[in-house]
Image: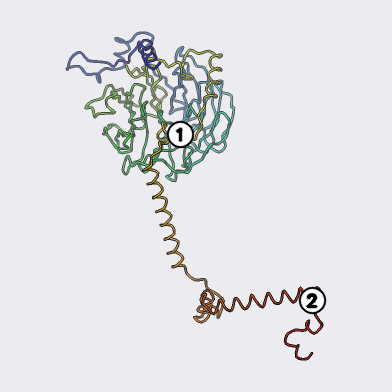
Amino acid sequence: NAMAAADAEEILHTHTAGLVEVENDMEKTIQLTQRQLKNEHLEENIARNVYDLDLNEYGPYKMRYDRSGRYALLSGARGHVSIVDQHSMALKTEFFVGESIRDACFLHSGSMMAVSQDKNVFIYDDEGVEIHRLDGHRRVGGMEFLPYHWLLATVGNTGVLQYQDTSTGNLVSQHRTKLGPCHAICQNPFNSVLHLGHTNGTVTLWSPSSSEYLVKMLCHKGSPITSLAIDRSGRYMATGGGDSKVKIFDLRMLKEVHSYKTYGGAPTCLDISQTGVLGIGHGCHTTFWRPEALKVKMKEPYMKHQLSGKGPLESLRFRPFEDVCGIGHNNGISSIVIPGSGEPNLDSMEHFTNPYMDTKQRREAEVRSLLEKLSPDMIALDPDSVGGIEESNLIQRQQRMRDLAEEADAKKAVDREAAKNKKEKKRMRGRSKIAKKLQRKQKNIVDENMIKLKELRDQEKAERERQNEAIEDGGVEENDKAPAALKRFF
């Protein structure tokens, strides 16, 4: 079956992603501009993706795509929200919230979105109708939606990471990062672990089932983390810092591979496309590197694009299944074409990735996605460990038993040392003298005299009980009822 599936995949996946290649050494792909691409090299249906939207009144703008890449969500910092159909270039929804907007993202599909406003996070449908308000999410600066778990993760000025289940409306978990405000957040597509970039230059990895971070990495010493990006395989992470450097990390070894220097400003936004193209937004410039730039350090970028007078850039996002990149800046939105950045083959088994699905198909996809929803407890660094069985090994079991015994012995030794060094409680006047302390210690000593005294007391107690029983039965004379000290007078 596996071989048949592989053969079918080769037959069905007839398209391959191709980058721009030069004919001789004198030409360079970095010299190719968007105007040349649009006028000389691109077809009409692809060239229409190169455009600029001037929205000066409500900027700066951020831009995000849904999972299918058909709809783009535009959010202006001054309260403007709109959804644009990328196929027809028509405005689907537009409304104004009347307050500042920090971030916005689509949920499971393009029919619902979450908008982080001045104080709270609001959920809207594709017609701009408010569905719900998340009161517990305060001053959120970054949001990510986990599609396989139906979780909305938020973090912001309070430094609190929260997971909200959008299917039930319940708050799954809430973690205090204890590292101050945080606005750089990104999810690992491989294992759904969240990566948070902090102002002290560290990156922490989180899951809903752990109250502490899973991993903590010092990525930019002395500089804040401004942006994060993780490739589709979950192996490489790109971090942008205030030191104008973009560093590439191998998440399998948690080590730095290499770094790139940015000119014209610190990197404010990063993204990695489905094919591995690295996009960097710094100042008013955008730089794009080939997929090989994640593994080995390359000398020069693949392509670049300049937005003079529109920096610093707020967002940079690759459009799924298309060779398009959307850029949000102070003056609105810009869309450019980056050949080879999109995945050419569509996986029909993935929910909400079909850009042409109708209402009936969308409803069926929602039901199937809810039935296949994963538990938040299954989010771990190694997703293959979920549902596995530990192999039985005699040596490992014996070593585990020895470790447990050593831990127990060490704990007993610590308890004995603590009891020995325990400071005696201060007692009332006269009780803390040396003689009184010696008397209290003497009470705990069991010697031969103490044993005899205890036996004598037990005999006297038994005799008293026997006499009391005899008196109750009426078999004892009146003088026997008298105390022992008064018996000589009878």
Label 2: which secondary element: helix
Q: Compared with residue 342, is residue 45 higher up or lower down, i.e. above or below?
A: above
Label 1: which secondary element: loop
Residue 99 horizontal/vertical position (percent): 53, 32
In which quarter of the view is residue 32 placed? Answer: top left
Q: Compared with residue 471, is residue 422 higher up or lower down, i.e. above or below?
A: above
Residue 384 horizontal/vertical position (percent): 41, 31
Examine the rendering and report whether any part of residue 47 can be seen. no
Q: Nearer the viewer, residue 183 or 418?
A: 418
Q: Which residue is mark 1?
A: 379
Amino acid type for the residue under numbered disc 1: Ile
User: In the displayed image of the protein, which residue is found farthest to the left?
Assistant: 25
Counting residues from the N terminus, which is met first, the one under dot 2 or under dot 1?
1
Residue 421 horizontal/vertical position (percent): 44, 67
Q: Nearer the viewer, mark 2 or mark 1?
A: 2
10 Å crowding of disc 2: few (<14), some (14-19), many (20+): some
User: In the displayed image of the protein, which residue is found farthest to the bottom?
Assistant: 489
Residue drawn 59% across and 76% down?
454
Q: Which residue is mark 2?
A: 471
